[in-house]
Image: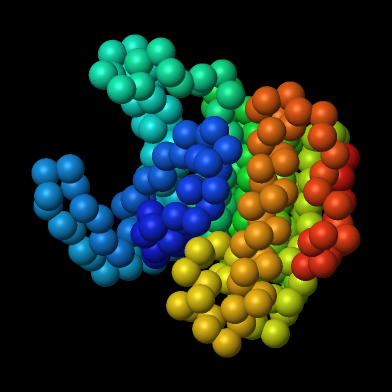
Amino acid sequence: MGYGWRASLAEKAANFASHGYIVVASDPSDTAATLFPDGTYLTQSYPGPTPAVFQDRLRDPTFILDELTRWNTDDAVFAGRLDLAKVAAMGTCCGYPVTAEFSRNDPRCKAAILVACVADRWPCLGSAAPVPELDQFGLGKPLLVIYGENYANYTWLFDKSAKDAVAFQIRGTQELGSAMILVSDFYWFLYPNYLATGREASRTIAAYSLWFLDKYLKGSSDPAPPLADYPRVLGFKQK
């Protein structure tokens, strides 16, 4: 997320966990507020989308995987219970380019789900130049891209994939002028007049994300969810 909080993805996390996935979310350095393990509560003003924020966010998933590796060795609850050969990353809003670059660069990450919220190819990079390797080579890993109806520039990573890539838009976001409704599970709070769009978008993202994860992490051969059951899907593409 951008200037958000972990709970803004609570619905997606609970859904994934109910299907056997372990979900870990972090508070990036530009988060609005965070609660530390010792009870300390920190709030701050938004530092803005800068290259420094991008680089700091990029360190978060690496740290998380390093910690999970340690937990799998000596944690009282998780030792021996984490399958770290089957790891995927999901990035939304400002986490979109961070997750893309992390997934490209870290061999431990096997697949990526990217959900766009703004019509900006490089959110949270400010005026910095794009990541050259992503621009040139793409991810080189299984990829699911979901973006708003009024965005025309979010197929670029899909286009660079030779295989194992899916992309589609969510119908109904054009009238909002933003696709924030796709990336926050508090769509009912952000857009109370568009509950049907929020519910259907959330249901669609969950269904296709679970199918994608099962396919590329668990080896499932099930076909993609039928488009007839998800009328919000627009321009579905698969390689």
For this rendering, which residue is in front, 85 or 114? 85
Instruction: Tell me what residue is drawn at x 73 percent, y 77 percent.
Output: 172
Instruction: Tell me what residue is drawn at x 82 percent, y 29 percent.
Output: 221
For this rendering, which residue is in front, 133 or 8? 8
What is the x, y in percent for residue 214?
Answer: 69, 33
Where, by quadrant of the figure, is residue 178 drawn? bottom right
From the image, which quarter does the C terminus lie in?
top right
What is the x, y in percent for residue 10?
Answer: 44, 55
For this rendering, which residue is in front, 188 or 100? 188
Instruction: Tell me what residue is drawn at x 52 percent, y 72 percent.
Output: 187
Image-based side of 140 in relation to 45, left or right = right
What is the x, y in percent for residue 65?
Answer: 42, 28
Above or below: residue 218 compared with residue 153: above
Q: Decide if residue 51 is in sight here.
A: no
Above or below: residue 23 compared with residue 75: below
Instruction: Tell me what residue is drawn at x 86 percent, y 57 percent.
Output: 227
Above or below: residue 197 compared with residue 58: below
What is the x, y in percent for residue 139?
Answer: 69, 36
Above or below: residue 67 compared with residue 10: above
Farthest residue, direction front: 18
Image-based side of 226 in relation to 9, left or right = right
Q: Decide if residue 108 is in sight here.
A: yes
